[in-house]
Amino acid sequence: MPVSSQSDITRRLVSIANRLRERGVKVGTMEIETALRLYKAAILLSGYNYYPLSRIIDAVFVKRDYEKAILDDVLRSTVGESVERGEEAPSKKKGKAEKKQEKSRAMGGSSLRSRRCLEMLKRYLETENQGYLDMIRDELRIDTRSEVKEYRVGGEIALEKLIARFALNPRDYSALARIALMEGETAILAMRHLSSKRKRRVAEQIASMLAKLSGGRRLRVKGGKWEKTYQRERIDIRRTLILKSRGKIGEVAYRRRRKTANIVLIIDRSDSMRKHADKIVEIASAYLNKASHLVLFSDEVKVTSISSWKSRLYLLDQILDLSFHGYTNITMALRQARRLAKPGSTLVLISDLQQTIKDHSPLKLIEDLGKGGYRIIIYTTKEASRVLGTTLRGDITTISFG
Amino acid sequence: MSEESYRKSYESIVEKVWGIYAEAHPPVQPVRNPEAAHRVLKEKYKLLVDVNLIILVYAAFLDGRPVLFEGPPGTGKTEIGEALLTLWSGREAFVLPCSENYDEYRVIGDFHPLKAYKYGFNEKSFLPKPLLAAMIMDTGVLIDEIRRSNEEFQNLLLDIIDKRRIIVPELRMTFRASGVGFQFIFTSNPEDLAQSELSDAFLRRVVRIKFSYPDPERELEILRLRLSHLDVKVPEEIMSLSVEVVSRLRKEDLLYKPGVSDTVRWMEVSSRIASLKGKTRVDVSDVLEAAKAVLVKRVEDEESVLDIVESMIR
Ligand SMILES: Nc1ncnc2c1ncn2[C@@H]1O[C@H](COP(=O)(O)OP(=O)(O)OP(=O)(O)O)[C@@H](O)[C@H]1O
Ligand SMILES: [Mg+2]
């Protein structure tokens, strides 16, 4: 994102949301996420890589008219960090957008348009949202009518043609593959898209072959006979393929049921952590999509398991609504976490490591867990991390904040 | 129900929907580029809409979020909403003016009582209604004056928008949105105290866009756009005068404040009156006469409105 980076925008959104909350305007995490997504889409749609963030905030954070006055006040009092970077007075906005427009015209328009299409293509690959393809089609149709064609240099024409080909037929993998070759960042996404589609196709072929072979039954490994199975067994395609390549055509490998490795997010919400609230939200959000459990602790421990996307939202809500009080018992929280996840899992601990309740030493337990096969990531204060760095062994990473 | 027969009755409902609604909702050239949409709105729909507003609406659509247009009467919410939905989905949008007693039978589907008696509750007796039709036809829906509906209905809508599917229990069938054309715009006038409030849960899920009266320059621009087709022309001075009058009325303590639609209508009626009198241009007397017909909506306001109008136009 050009005007400012995405994390920058997120930070501003979170900070404004927080200030609104302080004034009694309820702004949930869902709204912050929505605002961010809308902002991204709006920038893309605007064509000048610019859209006033304040408008998004207005549309998403403000629910009733009286809240608008509060928002205006909050925005006014946001000293030193104006919402629109370099966009202090509303009257200037137009000027700036216009300048951008002029600049884009000076560039011949075509290159910018290609970039835009590429951006939309990227979004499509990320989200598989049909709407982006439609927009590309729109964009390029307009293009063929206008005079821009003449200005174009070789590379750009080729790229736009390829994008158009793909937009008209999203199964045109060869076009996508060629775009991927030409474009750095898009390439990664494109390859992922390609490989997952390809994999899916191969998997479908194998599955249909297997279904034919088995007639709905599972192959008993011993004795090599087909027998009925009532349990749903998942076929391990990779291993089946390997068997195939070794000439064992009829043999099928099944997935072993295994508890998968997890990430447990452990957050200290004792009184002393209050001053790090911003950091907690920032760090926790980064793990949110991966975590399987959330452990909040002070002198007591609260565990939330995360299963679906919905409860992830709930989880984020919890993090954003954190209240800080109580003493700290890190050891108890870690013991709880150990029960939730088996070795091989990752434990992410956010704490200032100030144990204020008598229990076994948390550092000792952290070290034991590290030796016991857990991967441990600790986010803590500068001082604490300095101490930790010299004392802990095992798969333990410490990162300082504040 | 076997898969085969499910497919058949599903298809017969889809067919029914197209049969009933296709004519009233013909395809149009979709316009998904905001600047192009701005142009088309102006030229084809005679609507002056800020590009940033279009961008925000389209961004919400891309994100599958419903949009709420909030603002005083006559600021173009309904017309602009309908036009944007139409341009986005490439098909004439559905418009549902809300009423207190809306429920799923009125908006999703109902059963023909006699046919239901004869054939049972199945696709033969089923009558698809606009919301289901819009989903099947991948078309936008404008829910006008949402605050007139009950909360249960609002929750039903949110559920459909969220999950992009409609379940009809009697048919044991689930319909799913197939494309991105199925989008929603709600309109509401928060100053209308007679209507109920929207719940927090509802407001949290929508992208809220505030409409307000345009500044005089813009209103004048709208007038020029809207009145260009009239045979009996309204002179520029009269247009600016009318804009001044309405903006003054909006500052007064009136029960009904004139919107842009009233300014437009006022000038249109003035032109009609002038034409009846055989004039070639509208003059002040026509405007005064039209004011009585157009600007006075409530008896309680009559005196103050006419006082202001007469004092300003002479
Ligand atoms: N931006 C605009 N461009 C062109 N015409 C406009 C605009 N805003 C308002 N109008 C005028 O207002 C009319 C549309 O009013 P509309 O009924 O859509 O307003 P509304 O906000 O939905 O009002 P209500 O609350 O009474 O339903 C148009 O026919 C036109 O005369
Ligand atoms: Mg309306």
Image (cartoon, grey):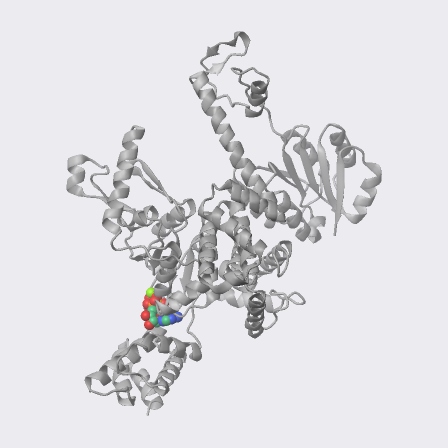
In the rendered view, would you say A339 is above or below B90? Answer: above
Residue A101 shows in this picture: yes
In the rendered view, would you say A192 is above or below A153? Answer: above
The residue that appears at 27% across and 53% down in the rendered structure is: B101
In the rendered view, would you say A5 is above or below A225? Answer: below
Q: In the image shown, does A59 or B250 lie closer to the viewer? A: A59
Write down the quadrant of residue B45 in the picture.
bottom left
Left or right: A91 as drawn, with respect to B311:
right
In the rendered view, would you say B231 is above or below A331? Answer: below
Q: How many marks?
A: 0
Q: Where does the image place residue A237, in percent across and percent down from the top left? A: 54, 24
Q: Where does the image place residue B256, in percent across and percent down from the top left? A: 33, 74
Left or right: A373 as drawn, with respect to B46:
right
Residue furthest toward the top? Answer: A223
Q: Where does the image place residue B295, in percent across and percent down from the top left? A: 30, 79
Residue furthest toward the bottom? Answer: B314
Left or right: B70 as drawn, with respect to A28:
left
Q: In the image shown, does A367 or A42 lie closer to the viewer? A: A42
Q: In the image shown, does A10 or A392 lie closer to the viewer? A: A10
Q: Where does the image place residue B309, in percent across and percent down from the top left? A: 33, 86
Write down the quadrant of residue B15 in the picture.
top left
